Image (cartoon, rainbow, N blue to C red):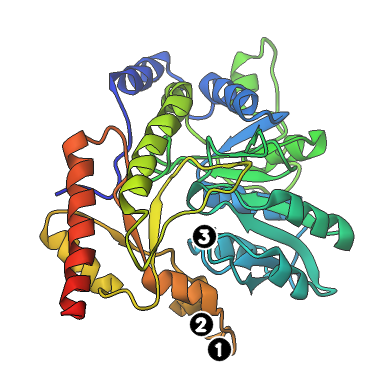
Amino acid sequence: MIAIAKPYLTNEEAQAAYDTILTGWITQGPKVEEFEKKFAAYTGAKYAIAVSNCTTALHLAMIIAGINAGDEVLCPSLSYIATANAIKYVGAKPIFVEVQPDTYNMDPVDAEKKITSKTKAILVVHQIGMPADIDAFQDLCIKYNIKLIEDAACAAGSSYKGKRIGSHSSLACFSFHPRKVITTGEGGMITTDRDDYYERFKLLRQHGMSINDRVRHEAKKIVFEDHVEVGYNYRMTDIQAAVGIKQLEKLDWIVGERRKIAAAYHEAFKDLPFIQLPLEKEGYLSNYQSYSIYLKNGCPIDRNTLMQELLNCGISSRRGIMTSHRETAYKNESTDLTLPVSEDLQDNSIILPLYIPMKENEIRFIIDTFSALVKNKLQDVLI
């Protein structure tokens, strides 16, 4: 069975974790600080703050941005449910915005239509690694005096107009889940260019503690901590950070290899009828965290049948990106909401395997099998 995704981990990551365990620093410590500095340098951000996962990063970003109960935050429904959940965590209301059919990313035109006096932020998602139109959303935020938050869970290594994702705004949140381009098992990172945000993030991720564990353990005199506000236990461990440092060293190479596989898919499928391939506009560079194909109206094989046929041949696939407003957790409060583009993309998109290293024969088998299934079904229809 060809998997949908696999993390790229080697003996180097295993050795880094092993060596870190032997130092005695198990929780947040010097490796976390090293990872933060290196991630900030990689993205071009002033600061990076490591946390337990991207959902906790988004939660803290909401708090830092001043989002409160009763506020509204615009976000796409076409995203993993954690995007909307982070808004709910602070008592605010997610306002679901339509996406653009060619990029899967939030539509700035529809976003502006949904801004009200209660809107306090826009949570834009760089969906499956494809950068969103950051400039357009920054313009909206300036125009309406609201905050911009980037859900960059899938976008480590992606770039927008020559700058890596993480360096464009004051709040960008990344994931290191195993399905992402680099992984620490679980884990997340927030990048910011603001000193005040940076200092408060450090407080909030560790129970609002004024002095962290490392400072207390290394102190030559007695030190007593104070808990200056209600915070959270959202720390990353040094073991995870040690793995993350090694992963970060390989990130550019990993992205390059993923883009080669995506290019092979592009070339193989570009002339297939009824197929829409991912669009990478000028100035946008995707890490291809996932490779999603949309089956246009009139496609001779429906998405679910295609997925089953691929599975019968030993190829894993996934349905299109979920629409949060149709999930049980949200549909009762979204009864009057229709997002035809988002719903169509979820219902008629298929995500194909993409990970490194993929063997050439695996890539060729996926290409040949997918093409044959579509072409054979088309031939049956024509006959």
* Residue where numbered disc 3 is placed: 82
- Crowd tier of the residue under label 1, counting other residues whose Cα lies within 10 Å: few below 14, some 14–19, many 20 or above: few
Q: Secondary structure at mark 1?
A: loop
Which image quarter: residue 361?
top left
Q: Name the foreground residue: 375 vs 326.
A: 375
Question: Contact (CB < 8 A) between labels 2 and 1?
Answer: yes
Quarter of the figure that contains the C terminus: bottom left
Query: Residue 191 location in percent, x, y?
Result: 66, 37
- Could you tell me residue 27's position as x and y percent? 48, 29
Depicted 152 relative to depicted 306: above or below: above
Residues 39 and 269: in front is: 269
Residue bearing the label numbered 2: 331
Residue in view at x 39 percent, y 77 percent: 297
Q: Residue at x 76, y 75 (%)?
A: 113
The structure residue drawn at horizontal position 27% and vertical position 58%, both measured from the top left corner, is 317
Answer whether labels 2 and 3 touch (C-beta < 8 Å).
Answer: no
Q: Earlier in the sequence, mark 2 or mark 3?
A: 3
Q: Which residue is mark 1?
A: 335
Q: Amino acid at mark 1?
A: Thr
> Is residue 26 visible to the viewer in this orientation of the structure?
no
**Label 2 – label 1 distance at C-alpha:** 6 Å
Which secondary structure, mark 3?
A: helix
Q: Would residue 165 be found to the left or right of residue 373 on screen?
A: right
**Is residue 85 rendered to the left or right of residue 352?**
right
Dot 2, crowdedness within 10 Å: few (<14), some or many (≥20)? few
Count neighbours of disc 3 (C-alpha within 10 A) and say few if under 14, some if 14 to 19, many if 20 or more: some
Question: How far apart are labels 2 and 3 at the CA level?
Answer: 15 Å
